[in-house]
Amino acid sequence: MEISAVKNSYKRWAPVYDKTFGAITRIGRRKAVEYINAHQGRVLEIGVGTGLSLPHYKTHLEITGIDVSSDMLDKAREKVADLKLQHVVELREMDARFLDFPDNHFDTVVAMYLVSVVPEPEKVVAEMARVCKPGGSVLIINHFKREKGVLAIFERIFAPLSNVLGWHSDFDMNRVLGANKLEVAERKSFPPLKMFTFLLQKKAS
């Protein structure tokens, strides 16, 4: 998808995102935040969107969020202000392909429901690896294509509509594996219908 298509898609979805996609993706967000809360340090959430996960991070963490959509970020900033989330230190508009952070800066870098939306996902994951500290975690929650079954057929049918839907239904997991110094530490599917995957990669020390 082109970056303009991403922005236009999320401009349309921003007002209703929490009650639509937000509901569908709740389980995955909870699993990601539970993992992150059990660790320490700086966290970068790429594609923070309307800030659905922000109230659930524990206060011992230092949270930074970025998103390419100013409309989504406006909603996230409202949450931070309303709920007085002081551990959310920064929310910035930024293209995930060009992260404006130094190397080896964050203990955990997470992207939830993002990699099948952005252009050049390989470049995004390479940037996630770059800004992650050695020994840190790069966590991806996403839908990845199936090779067989009824759902695989539907994924192929909807694939040409990616710019309308705002995501690629037939996204291949291999596109986000193999970034420099990243090794898969855990991979598991979860409901509904095992549609989504918890993919944890660790950066070599």
Image (cartoon, rainbow, N blue to C red):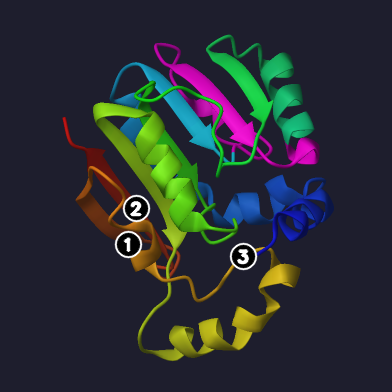
Between the C-alphas of marks 1 and 3, the distance is 19 Å
Give whichever of discs 2 and 3 has the lower sequence position.
3
Counting from the top left corner in percent of width and height, residue 13 is at: 78, 53
Residue 69 magenta-highlighted: yes
Is residue 82 visible in the rendered structure shown here? yes
Q: Residues within 10 Å of mark 2 (few under 14, many from 20)?
A: many
Name the residue: 45% across, 12% down. Answer: 59
Q: Does 25 sit above or below residue 155?
A: above
Disc 2 to disc 3, how far (Cα)?
A: 18 Å
Can you identify the residue that label 3 sits on?
167
Q: Position of residue 97 (x, y in %)?
A: 55, 44
* 157 within the magenta span: no
Q: Which residue is mark 1?
A: 189
> Are there few (<14), some (14-19), or many (20+) residues within 10 Å of tag 1?
some
Give SS at disc 2: strand
User: Which kind of residue does numbered mark 3 sit on?
Assistant: Trp
**Left of 91 or right of it: where is 58?**
left
Q: Badges 1 and 2: C-beta atoms under 8 Å apart?
A: yes
Amino acid beneath label 2: Phe
Position in image of residue 33 (x %, y %)? 41, 34
Range covered by the magenta-colored residues: 48-72
| Vertical position of residue 138 compared to residue 149: above or below | above
What is the quadrant of residue 134 in the picture? Answer: top left
Q: Secondary structure at mark 3?
A: loop
For label 2, the residue is 198
- Quadrant (top left/top right/bottom left/bottom right) for the N terminus: bottom right
User: 53 or 173, which lies in front?
Assistant: 173
The image quarter containing residue 80 is top right
Identified by mark 1, the residue type is Ser
User: Is residue 4 found left or right of 100 in the rendered image?
Assistant: right
